[in-house]
Amino acid sequence: MLKKFEKYLYIVSPILVLVSLFSFYLKRDFGLLSIATLVSGLLIGLLFFMRFYEDVVKKITKRKIRYGINSVIITVVVLGIVVIVYLVLMDRNKRFDLTQVKRFTLSDQTTKVLEGLEGPVNAYAFYSKQMDPTGIRELFGQYNYNYRDFEFEIIDPDLSPAQAEEMGVTEYGQVIIEYGGRTEKIKNNNEEGITNALIKLLQTEVKKIYFISGHGERSPQEYDNNGYDQIKGAIETENYAVEELLLFRAERVPEDASVVVAAGPETDYAPYEIGLLDEYVQSGGRLFFLIDPAEGNKYVNIASFLEKYGLLLGSDIIIDPLSRVLSGDFFMPVINSYTYNPITKDFKLATFLRIARSVSTKDDPGENIFVRIVASTGDASWAETNFERLTAGKANFDEGVDTKGPVPIMAYATISRPSESNEEDEMFEEHKPEDAVIALVGDSDFVTNAMYQTQGNKDLFLNTINFLADRGELISVRPKQQESVYLTMTAQQGRIAFLVSIILIPLFSIAVGIYITIQRRVRS
């Protein structure tokens, strides 16, 4: 009886080994069950081989058995090679995003932020059973693919109420990011929301951006189409605080001002206000002027102040026939030419302005001042100086009077301390923290609530803010809202697609099958 049972040990042995491996696969750990079954299986196999050694040798020496064993060995070797290759490559996979809108590719900004991380990141998404977590799981997977220490977990708050309460979760769909012992809750469960949360966790210092008020400037508090409420929100997501500054009532520019923005003043600044700004620049301050075109000498004090530091305001309006082709009008110039500078060195998006003037730089800006053009319009554009003709609805390029495109539209000046060297190559790479910087663009409309999401408008503005605030690691192209891509066909194209896919291809397959069947019968 015992001998009959011993003959079946060769079946029991591999079964026990498989049970051990399966247990390890489920638990990802060699527990007591895995170790016990593995050892038992190996011992039983060894016992069977020793007990029936002569019988095994006799069967192995038979030709059929020998060929069978050779086949088994080859199969095992091939499977072993496949397993080894898989284990080597499983953590070295490569993704290719073939979608038109790059749906499965993270933005440049997200990639830069992930490169700056040091240490593990934990993400928790609290989704109920009734909610579909596919989208957030795919998004978390993209972050994990680019940063291996990004761990994530989808939690049902109904099944884990204690964990939800501990993390302060108050509603379904909330996402919480943990990094460096700090946590951040996300309002928008998309790439922009997650990346902005990581930026806040990385940046412990909240810098202040002041918007000058009192002269009809664009207000970060205005919600209409001409306001800056939306761009204010975008600034705050990058860990800045935004406040307004009334220079008339100030004794000086606040010491905590990282950047001061003059966004589209409708009247000139008084000498007292210019004096405050000049004092701010002399102490290493950062200014960002967005000046709209105006007829005559409307901004005498502002223009003189900018000229002192090598920046010039043009008395003109830029005309761009290309915008007409892009469903705009002649007064919406397209910026598609950028110099290699810290603001736009990796910038490839077009920017659309609305009623803009030219800016330029002085050939000799003065000692310790370095100036650079940032962006220009296209070749077809020009800077029109005849305002009367524009008022009458006419515009023609006048050789020798108007400036032919490309027309500079944005520039900046770096003012170093007198004791510092002023070598262009050194200053181009990145201004020193103690240097003053003034950025100038000839339009304030391009980041209003109505236009800030147009192409690269928001990115160009925020890159300039980050450049001025010495946050060069945030200069990038930010995540865009995912757009649905639809296949639009005419009625004729739809009929052709239906005919080919539903009728012709199946008929062809059936015809080939019938032909092969007939040929076989004829031959037989």
Image (spheres, grey):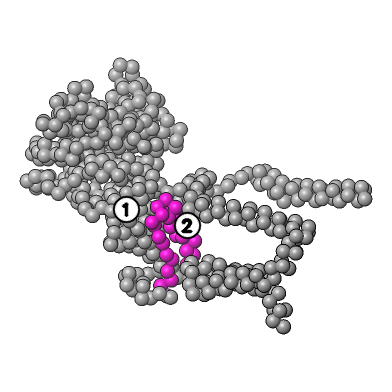
What is the count of numbered marks? 2
Using the image as rendered, state which of residue 281 and residue 353 is in the foreground. Answer: 281
Residue identifier under label 2: 138
Q: Which mark identifies residue 148?
A: none
Q: Is residue 393 left or right of residue 510?
A: left
In which image quadrant can residue 361 be found?
top left
Residues shaded magenta = 131-157
Q: Position of residue 22 (x, y in %)?
A: 56, 68
- Answer whether labels 2 and 1 touch (C-beta < 8 Å): no
Q: Position of residue 254 (x, y in %)?
A: 12, 47
Residue identifier under label 1: 118
Q: Position of residue 277 (x, y in %)?
A: 13, 39
In which image quadrant can residue 262 be found?
top left
Given the current orientation, which residue lies at the most extreme top position? 400
Tell me if residue 441 comes above or below residue 5 in the rendering.
above
Q: Amino acid at mark 2?
A: Glu
Say which label, 2 or 1, has the lower sequence index: 1
